[in-house]
Amino acid sequence: MLGLWVGAEIAHAAGAPDAPADVVTSSIFAAVAVGCAIAARAELRPLLASTGGWRGALAAVAAFGILMAFGAIYFPGIRALGFRTVTLTAPYVQAGWPRAAAYALLCFAPGVFEELTFRGYVMARLDRVLAPRETLLVQAALFSLLHLSVIIFPSHFVIGLVLGALRRRTRSLYPGMAVHIGWNATVVWAELAGRSLP
Amino acid sequence: MSPVSVPCGVCPQDIGLGAAVCPGCGREVNDQDRAVLQVRLEGSNFAAHDRGRHMRQASTWIGVLAILFAVSAPIVYAMQDAEAEKALAQLDRFDDGAELQPIDGKVYTAGELRKQVAREPLQALITNLVLAGLMGVLWLWARRAPLPAIGCALALFIVVEVASAVVDPTTIYKGIIVKVIAVGALVKGLRAALAARAAMQRPAP
């Protein structure tokens, strides 16, 4: 992810249009995530075979509520300090792409492929060498670090912890994917509607 | 029973190397048990002592990085404040509503840019203090659980350095010797911590 981000920044500096560059970056990340999932297929098979059932759905709703409540405090706080949050949808709006493209590339793709990578591959591999609590903390730390902005490290660490705990509790990746897609969709919807939620 | 062990504390049994739970009561082995087992293993084994030394050095470097971020915070603040004052002086000749030349493709009014420039020193201060705080937390964690803490510290340091280099390539050369030594110590510490964890998980003969 770090390499992809550096590549995207170099492409941006070289004058490449942002929206198509995002598509390329997302496609490469998706391929990497699928490769990781294949490499850890033995550990991921039970996580992908179960949906988590109604308990998983309830846990996902609770996790989403926790994240929205947390976001409603954290993000207005950093905006009050003058930090600008990145406008994710701007490249798509400027390129005249349909809203569905923004939802697909900013909500669906990260929701599925980041969950496969962090809550799937990374947690499975860390579980080999670390205690369960350590795995939860380290995957959340890596998840936050790879969003590459110091001021959102704390918020994304909390998001990573909640999604990791959801994966542990439900023994499935789907509730986490649903929460992740829901969270990103809320951010994209708010941006497109000209609001500042969460 | 392994010659290196730690009393359970809940039941009269001892917990040996390689155990995930107490053989007497089933209590899960925690970070504190592992730390005591590591110290006792180091006392009886030269390789373990060497691993422990590398882990302690890495842990010390995490503390050093925390102090460096904390010390650099007010220095960067002062430098940015001086730059901001110069920029604000140049912006003085524009009215608040006047549109300026685009910066990174975005058009600002003079009023917006003034606000942004005035906030930048505080933002740099907060950013460095957040990094110092994170490294401080990792330094504390490294005393209980060196492997995950050193891994996170190394990842944090690399991400921050790469991000800084992308935003401003001149940062690559700034403090290069300290950066190389810090990364070297963290990598050595991480490898030692991995070997130590493997030794802990391997039952003693």
Image (cartoon, rainbow, N blue to C red):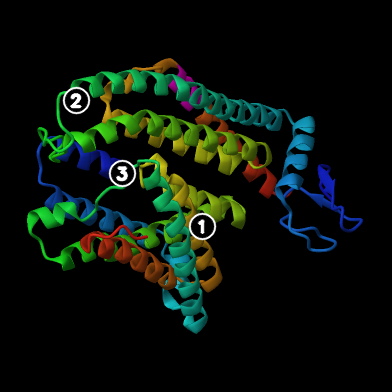
Q: Residues within 10 Å of mark 1 (few under 14, many from 20)?
A: many
Q: Is residue A174 above or below residue B28?
A: below
> Which one is nearer the viewer's eye here, A111 or A62?
A62
Query: Which residue is under mark 1?
Result: A161
Query: In this orientation, does residue B204 appear?
Result: no
Q: Do marks 1 and 3 share a chain?
A: yes
Residue B91 is labelled as 2
Q: Do marks 3 and 2 share a chain?
A: no
Q: Position of residue A64 (x, y in %)?
A: 44, 68
> Which one is nearer the viewer's eye here, B183 or A90?
A90
Q: What are the residue bounds of the magenta stretch?
A: B178-184
Q: Position of residue A68 (x, y in %)?
A: 43, 64
Tell which residue pokes out farthest to the left in this image: A96
Q: Chain of mark 2?
A: B
Query: Which residue is under mark 3?
Result: A84
Task: Tell me which amino acid carries mark 1.
Answer: Leu
Task: Tell me which amino acid carries mark 2.
Answer: Leu
Q: Secondary structure at mark 2?
A: helix
Q: Residue at x 50, y 61 (%)?
A: A162
Residue A148 is labelled as none
Q: Chain of mark 3?
A: A
Left or right placement of residue B193 versus residue A162 in this view: right
Tell which residue pokes out farthest to the right in this image: B12
Q: Total number of numbered labels?
A: 3
Q: First in sequence: mark 1 or mark 3? A: 3
Closer to the observer: label 1 or label 3? 3
Task: Tell me which amino acid carries mark 3.
Answer: Arg
